[in-house]
Structure formats: C-alpha cells, structure tokens
Image (cartoon, grey):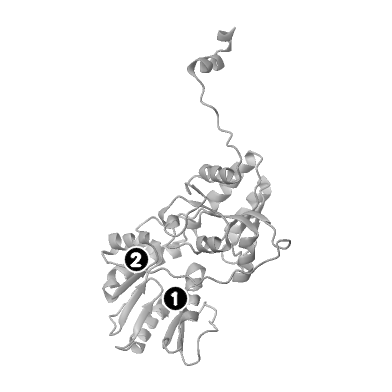
Amino acid sequence: MHAPNVHQGGGKTLLLQLLKATKDKLLVATILDRRLVMPECLSDEVKSIYVKSSLMSRIVAEYQLVKLATKTDVVFCFGNLPPILRLNSEVVLFIQNRYLVNNMPLNGFSLKYKLRIILERIWLKSCISNADRIIVQTNSMKNLVWRSLKRKSEVIPFYTFNKITSYDSKVCNKKYDFIYVATGEPQKNHYNLLKAWEILAEEKIFPSLCLTLSYEKYPSLVNYINDASKKNGLNVENVTEKAFQEMNFLYKSSGALIYPSTLESLGLPLIEAEQAGIPIIASELDYVRDIVEPHETFDPCSPLSISRAVKRFLRIKNNSGLIMPAERFLLELIPELGK
C-alpha cells in the first residue's frame, strides 16, 4: 500500500477503510503519510514506513518502494500518483484527485498548493506508463482520465457502510435545517454558500446551517464565516471536524445535506447522507448524479440559484415579479394614461 500523501478528507476515510478491510496475510508493507493517525488495524508484522510532507521525503519513499516491491507483489498506489521508477511488481493506480487530471485554473489556492498541483500533474503524465492498471470511482472520472491521459481505467468505487445507530427521537431532533460536511478548499465553495444565506436573510429567511470546518486548518475562512454570520444575523454554526459516530448524529440531526462543491471525484458526504436517510440538495454536476439522485439541484456558481433551491426545498414561494402585459407596463410607466 503506497499512500505517502494521504492524511485528510475523503482520501483518509477511504484509506483507513481499505487498511481495515485488508487481511494481514495480504498486506505486506505500507508507505504512509506521517500526518495520518496510526491505524490500529495494522499488524506488527506489516512493515510500515511513514513519510514526511516534503518533496525530498516523497522521493526517498519512491526508492524505498523499489526496494520493497517484489515480482509477486501488487503495489497499490492510493495517492493519485504512479511510481517514478518502473517496478517489477504489478502496479495499480487509484486516481481520485480531479485537479491532477483536469487542467483547470487553480484560483483561490495558495502559491504553495498551486506549485504542488502543477508538479504532481507533471509527475502523473510523465510516469503514467509505470501503472499497469488505473482505478477510478465514477464514470465522470473515467472519461476525464481518458481525455487527459489517454489511458483506459476501471470504475470500481468502494465505501464501507457503517452501522447506523438508532437514536432516541427525543434526543435526535432536527437541530439544523441543513448540514454541509466539507473541508475548506476553494472547490468546496463555502463563499457562494454563505452568499446564498445572505440573500435568504435579505428576504427575512433564516434557515440553520451546520458546517464542519477545522479552525486550525482554515482560520481565515472560519473567521470570515463567523464575521459575516454575525453581521447579517445568519443562523450558521461551525462544529469543526468530528469522528464518525458524532458525524452520524449530526446527519440525523439535520433536515438535509446541502452540497455546493464544484469539483469532486466521489463526494463521500453524499453517500453518508443517503445512508443516514436525509434528503440531498446539491450542485447540478455529473459527479453528484454519478452516485445519488438529489432532491433539489442548483448552479453552484450562483448564490441566487443556491438560495432558490433552498426555498424550493423548504416550500417557500419564490417572490419573483410577474411578467405584465404591455398595457399594464405603460400604465406603470405613465400612470396618467389610466385616468
């Protein structure tokens, strides 16, 4: 298992599930990100190498991979990137980061992150021949990989459904109208979501919204949301990241999942919300309908569209102006004509 750059978000969730599902007799060695919490499921017999989050450490890990892999092994590259060097083993590459295969602008990201993505794009295209098989999670990603890399890929999505805890209805009330489970990267689209809530506030509509942002990782975004919410009287609460059982309680305590992300390879919260049995309001984009059928959709680039979808879901009539006939228009323009 080669995953030296996976430590947060949906990638972390899937990696930990995969490690837990892997039997000791199958898992020989792992190369993991040092920032990843040590999985309890790993046996002492499994050789584990932990890599620092630096380019030099990543390169060293590539040479360690060459030494570890044998002809009878299957190397599963879980971190979107193939090995730099050709291995004797069969290499299976799992691609889930759309930014690496979609040559789209990186607006909103820090300079450091932009440089990293550019470097990884070069890495992926230059070394893609070192992968024997490519695995993706949706048909959208399959098409994207073909257009960008000219390589066929297999659609094999996976997710381990956890047992839903039965909560007492008196305890598990619908505390929030909506919940948005997401980290704070630009594609998660928190700013447009907040603008939509501001539009609703102007119409004297104040639905409650639960966010799950880490202040330590995204302090400027969290401060912006807190300031905007206080200024406009928005009913927005940030509860930071939670463990699964707590997250499950939050899902069950919410009226619906709202998901305005503009770019996903899978979108795990969509699956989690469906498992929790709550409605989904999401972007009208291919990645959403690859895995779920949302109750309402919107244009994620338009705060107005998001606000209207929220009103439709809440069954609040949209106060749009009625189209009037030309005669009435003239009367509105020149009232004296009606005298």
Q: Is residue 106 left or right of residue 318?
A: left
Q: Position of residue 291 (x, y in %)?
A: 44, 60
Is there any visible trace of residue 68 in the rendered image? yes
Which residue is situated farthest in the bottom direction here? Answer: 45
In this rendered view, identify the residue nearer to me: 292 or 55. Answer: 292
Asked if 323 appears above or below 2 in the picture, the reply is above
Asked if 35 appears above or below 247 in the picture, the reply is below
Residue name at image x 63 percent, y 61 percent: 252
Q: Position of residue 21 (x, y in %)?
A: 48, 80
Give the Cα separation between the discs numbered 2 and 1: 17 Å
Q: Secondary structure at mark 2?
A: helix
Q: Amino acid at mark 1?
A: Ser
Q: Earlier in the sequence, mark 2 or mark 1?
A: 1
Q: Position of residue 112 (x, y in %)?
A: 45, 65
Residue position marked by numbered label 1 in the rendering:
54
Residue position marked by numbered label 2 in the rendering:
121
Asked if 315 appears above or below 139 in the picture, the reply is above
Q: Secondary structure at mark 1?
A: loop
Asked if 191 appears above or below 2 in the picture, the reply is above
Q: Position of residue 161 (x, y in %)?
A: 52, 70
Residue name at image x 50 percent, y 64 percent: 268
Q: Amino acid at mark 2?
A: Arg
In this rendered view, identify the residue nearer to me: 55 or 298. Answer: 298
**Comparing labels 2 and 1, the label whose residue is closer to the camera:** 2
